[in-house]
Image (cartoon, helix red, strand yellow):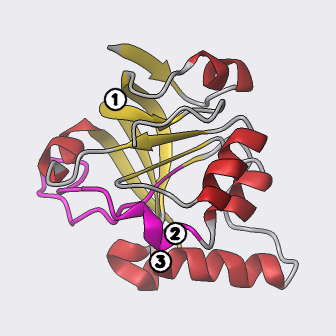
């Protein structure tokens, strides 16, 4: 199992191959459908985002509330295909990786290759496991969206698989 420390550089991305198991540590952002819609409204208005996209990693997830002794509750992946209309533009703006579940369309795969980015697959049904990998959680945008808000998560040894690498390799 390969350990990945964020942020991911282009060199890091080039070293990853589809099918490799990884443990990710560092800062990731969460964003689901509603947050992506808000992000695009801000971008379309030409306003600055309340967080940086360049070199960021977005996890398609919405964390559940935490018990008092935990940083987060369950935090399983959302189906990535729901974000396909958003991913290419964000990758073109410098997003270095996305984490989700399931296949992505040809346009998104082309954007991953073009931008030397990576798509990590998380395991559906393993939300409790992912919740335990979260060491801190902070809502950084759109708090009114509750679990669909953008959260900044500090993760340690977050398990995933390289689903699409920056050369076009795929586990699918």
* Residue at the disc numbered 2: 83
Q: Nearer the viewer, mark 1 or mark 2?
A: 2
Mark 3 = which residue? 33
Q: Residues within 10 Å of mark 3 (few under 14, many from 20)?
A: some
- Which secondary structure is most common in the magenta stretch? loop
Asked whether 69 or 97 is in front, the reply is 97
Q: Position of residue 108 (x, y in %)?
A: 63, 57
The x, y position of residue 136, in whole percent, is 35, 44
Mark on residue 156?
1
Crowd band around label 1 with a 10 angstrom C-alpha radius: few (<14), some (14–19), many (20+): many
**What residue lies at 33% left-to-right and 34% top-to-bottom?**
160
Disc 1 and disc 2 in contact, CB within 8 angstroms: no
- Give me the C-alpha separation between circle 1 and circle 3: 25 Å
Per the image, label 3 sits on a secondary structure element best described as: helix
Identity of the residue drawn at 63% across and 45% down:
56
Q: Is residue 131 above or below residue 40?
A: above
Residue range of the region highlighted in magenta in the rendering: 58-84
Give whichever of discs 1 and 3 has the lower sequence position.
3
Q: Is residue 3 left or right of residue 75?
A: right
CA separation in Å, label 3 and label 2:
7 Å
Q: In the rendered view of the protein, which quadrant contains the N terminus?
A: top left
């Amino acid at each position: 199992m390969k350990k990945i420390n964020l942020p991911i550089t282009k060199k890091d991305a080039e070293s990853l191959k589809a099918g490799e198991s990884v443990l990710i540590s560092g800062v990731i952002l969460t964003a689901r459908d509603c947050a992506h819609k808000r992000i695009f409204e801000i971008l379309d208005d030409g306003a600055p985002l309340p967080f940086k996209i360049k070199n960021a990693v977005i996890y398609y997830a919405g964390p559940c509330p935490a018990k008092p002794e935990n940083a987060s509750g369950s935090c399983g992946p959302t189906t990535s295909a729901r974000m396909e209309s958003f991913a290419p533009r964000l990758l073109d703006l410098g997003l270095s990786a996305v984490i989700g579940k399931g296949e992505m369309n040809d346009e998104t795969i082309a954007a991953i290759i073009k931008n030397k980015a990576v798509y990590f697959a998380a395991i559906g049904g393993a939300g409790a496991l992912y919740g335990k990998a979260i060491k801190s959680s902070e809502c950084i945008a759109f708090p009114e969206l509750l679990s669909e808000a953008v959260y900044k998560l500090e993760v340690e040894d977050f398990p995933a698989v390289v689903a699409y690498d920056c050369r076009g390799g795929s586990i699918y």
